[in-house]
DNA sequence: TAGAATTTTCAGAAATTTCTGAAACTTAAG
DNA sequence: CTTAAGTTTCAGAAATTTCTGAAAATTCTA
């Protein structure tokens, strides 16, 4: 497995960005390689192409499976496990988006919900509680919005994202429509 | 500076989540503390409340300033620098969102744009190039959408996030409206 | 069931990130 | 100008994360 310069650059970059996207360098590289390489690859090929240890590949694949970003395949007459990126680029983006929502929002929502249960003991705490409530409301709404977006089918999502400045016009439209509720 | 249990929990949690949100533990803690504490705090108070070194606080504040998440204040007759969280919770969320877009999307878009300039040398590279193009198109659109969202004022943003399943209906409406363009 | 092929695990090594604290620097006041 | 108050810097220590590679476990074949 020799990578072209292009592939090399792509893979290395995704390694660097990996940490910002929620996984480590080698996991990012493995994911990138599986994404541009249309043929399924086995663990040994990944290790060789990326020059990392076999054990590391095994752990990385485990993580990519936890993220539901890779798919397992088998070649007839070969006992090795082969992997590809799971689904289209859109599917991958959607999966990353959902996983990140889960990891970045849910734990915080859970904690804040708990904190809001106890009664403030003094002025100081009452103020803090208010802030916590604000943070909670906002994150909760964000979470639901992210959920709504996840559920849109690709066509609608595309439409929405392409709206650009048309979006605020559409929202006005909406408030008029629902405000008046005047058919005909 | 003694923190209530509640404040303590809030601060520690934001420390833990910090890494997922793009900053390190102590920066997360400092940000959390400045968020629930309505009075401005100086570097010594932060260091004491969070039990971290003075130097670390200085570096953390520098980072929070780079994120544009804190605001500098001065108290008359006191030479110390005092800090508060910059703006409302909504402002903070918007800022974090924008900063992350910049850090997570822009570098990748720049690289991919470059990669797309060179001509593929063989079949293999041509296929890879296609994938790269797909990734690029998607990220580019995401980036613009994120921009659009950033520019919405709070009222519209709220309206949009509250739509829930009404969103896809609104999008249908839109396609009919623009498709037919039939007034009255 | 033996053994060959493959994958997984995990202890410790290596790399990276974060944190400390003393020294250097800056600024304001006298 | 001198001193004191405050802030920043940064080399090295500490903590954390990632990676390796050999051994253990699993799975398939004959």
Image (tube, coloured by chain):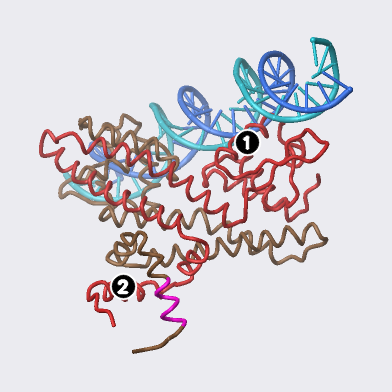
Chain colours: A red, B brown, C cyan, D blue
**Label tally:** 2
Q: Quadrant of the C terminus of chain A?
A: bottom left
Q: Residues within 10 Å of mark 2 (few under 14, many from 20)?
A: many
Which quadrant holds residue A88? Answer: bottom right
Q: Decide whether residue A183 is among the magenta residues.
A: no
Q: Is residue A32 found left or right of A134 in the rendered image? A: right
Q: What chain is tagged by disc 2?
A: A
Task: Looking at the image, tell me whether mark 1 or mark 2 is earlier in sequence order.
Answer: 1
The vertical placement of A126 against B116, above or below, is above
Q: Nearer the viewer, residue A180 or A40?
A: A180
Gap between marks 1 and 2, in whole Å?
Answer: 46 Å
User: What residue is pinned by disc 1?
Assistant: A60
Circle 1 sits in a helix, a strand or a loop, which is it? Answer: helix
Circle 2 sits in a helix, a strand or a loop, which is it? Answer: helix
| Residue drawn at 63 percent across, 36 percent down | A60
Instruction: Point out residue D12 in the picture as x, y percentages from the top left corner.
Output: 52, 26
The boundaries of the magenta stretch are B172-179
| Residue drawn at 48 percent across, 57 percent down | B102
Instruction: Point out residue A11 in the picture as x, y percentages from the top left corner.
Output: 67, 49
Q: Which mark is residue A174?
A: 2
Q: Residues within 10 Å of mark 1 (few under 14, many from 20)?
A: many
Q: Decide whether residue B174 is among the magenta residues.
A: yes
């Amino acid at each position: 497995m020799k990578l072209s310069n292009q592939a090399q650059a792509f893979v290395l970059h995704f390694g660097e960005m990996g940490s910002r996207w929620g996984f480590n360098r080698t996991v990012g590289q493995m994911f990138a390689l599986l994404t541009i390489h249309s043929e399924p690859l086995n663990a040994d090929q990944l290790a060789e192409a990326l020059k990392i240890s076999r054990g590391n590949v095994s752990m990385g694949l485990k993580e990519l499976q936890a993220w539901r970003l890779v798919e397992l395949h088998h070649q007839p007459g070969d006992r090795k496990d082969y992997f590809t990126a799971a689904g289209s680029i859109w599917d991958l983006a959607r999966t990353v988006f959902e996983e990140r929502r889960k990891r970045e929002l849910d734990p915080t929502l859970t904690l804040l919900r708990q904190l809001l249960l106890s009664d403030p003991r003094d002025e100081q705490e009452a103020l803090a509680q208010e802030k916590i409530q604000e943070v909670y409301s906002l994150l909760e709404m964000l979470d639901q919005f992210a959920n709504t977006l996840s559920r849109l089918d690709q066509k609608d999502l595309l439409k929405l994202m392409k709206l650009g400045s048309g979006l605020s016009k559409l929202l006005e439209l909406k408030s008029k429509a629902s405000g008046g509720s005047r058919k005909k």
